[in-house]
Image: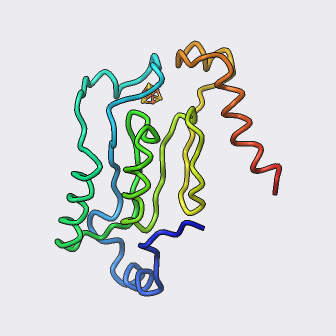
């Protein structure tokens, strides 16, 4: 298993039990303005962002935060479609104790067993295509990708 370098410890639980969650323990990062879908309800694309930090810029930012005692507890990785920047998310997730990736499911999920994936699929198959503009076959591909691992248990 590809393990995180930053994991929860007994000491974390004791500190949280005694003092509660520290400031900035829960946050989200929009890693990209890009998306491979064009959902009718998307508020993100309407904001018109056209630039994003490089992987090296993000890693430098994380290192600065580390030097300043940032808790690096729970991070939500978002976009746009965050898996368009797999390399950045893969490197960045190692700083945090828990990671949730909010994805549209069109890109195959990486084998990161210690990460939680939140996959958005909107409604029935017909409705999904009307809302997202996804190419034919996407809905069934996502369904298979999510269901097959469960059936293998
Ligand atoms: S998948 Fe998400 S980010 Fe992409 S267009 Fe749809 S709502 Fe917007």
- Chosen colour scheme: rainbow
Frontmost residue, 100 versus 34: 34
Q: As displayed, is residue 1 above or below residue 59? A: below
* Residue 114 found in image quarter: bottom right
**Numbered disc total:** 0
Q: Which residue is nearer to you in this view: 16 or 12? A: 12
Asked where in the image residue 31 lies, by quadrant, the reply is top left
- The quadrant of the rendering that contains the N terminus is bottom right
Placement of 5 over or under 24, stated as above or below: below
Q: Where residue 146 sits: x, y (%)?
A: 69, 42
Q: Position of residue 115 (x, y in %)?
A: 53, 58
* Residue 78 picture location, percent across and down: 40, 42
The residue positioned 57% from the left and 36% from the top of the image is 105
Say left or right for 69 vs 132.
left
Q: Is residue 1 left or right of residue 70?
A: right
Q: Quarter for ligand 1?
A: top left
Query: Which residue is pictured at 40% across the width and 42% down the height?
Result: 85
Q: Quadrant of residue 2?
A: bottom right
Give me the residue at 33% from left, 67% from top: 72
Identify which residue is drawn at 47% across, 20% down.
Answer: 39
Return the x and y of residue 9 as percentages of the image width and height. Answer: 46, 82
Quadrant of image for the C terminus: bottom right
Along the line of sight, which residue is nearer the eye, 26 or 72?
A: 72
Answer with left or right where residue 62 lies relative to residue 136. Answer: left
């Amino acid at each position: 298993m590809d393990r995180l370098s930053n994991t929860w410890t007994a000491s974390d639980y004791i500190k949280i039990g005694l003092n509660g969650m520290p400031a900035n323990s829960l946050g989200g990062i929009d890693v990209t303005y890009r998306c491979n879908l064009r959902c009718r309800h998307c508020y993100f694309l309407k904001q018109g962002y056209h630039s994003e930090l490089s992987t090296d810029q993000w890693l430098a930012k994380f290192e600065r935060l580390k030097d300043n005692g940032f808790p690096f507890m729970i991070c939500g990785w978002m976009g746009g479609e965050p898996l368009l920047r797999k390399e950045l998310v893969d490197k960045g997730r190692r700083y945090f104790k828990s990671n949730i990736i909010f994805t549209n499911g069109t890109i195959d999920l990486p084998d990161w067993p210690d990460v939680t994936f939140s996959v958005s699929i909107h409604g029935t198959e017909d409705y999904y295509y009307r809302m997202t503009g996804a190419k034919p076959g996407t809905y069934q591909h996502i369904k298979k990708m999510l269901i097959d691992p469960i059936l293998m248990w």
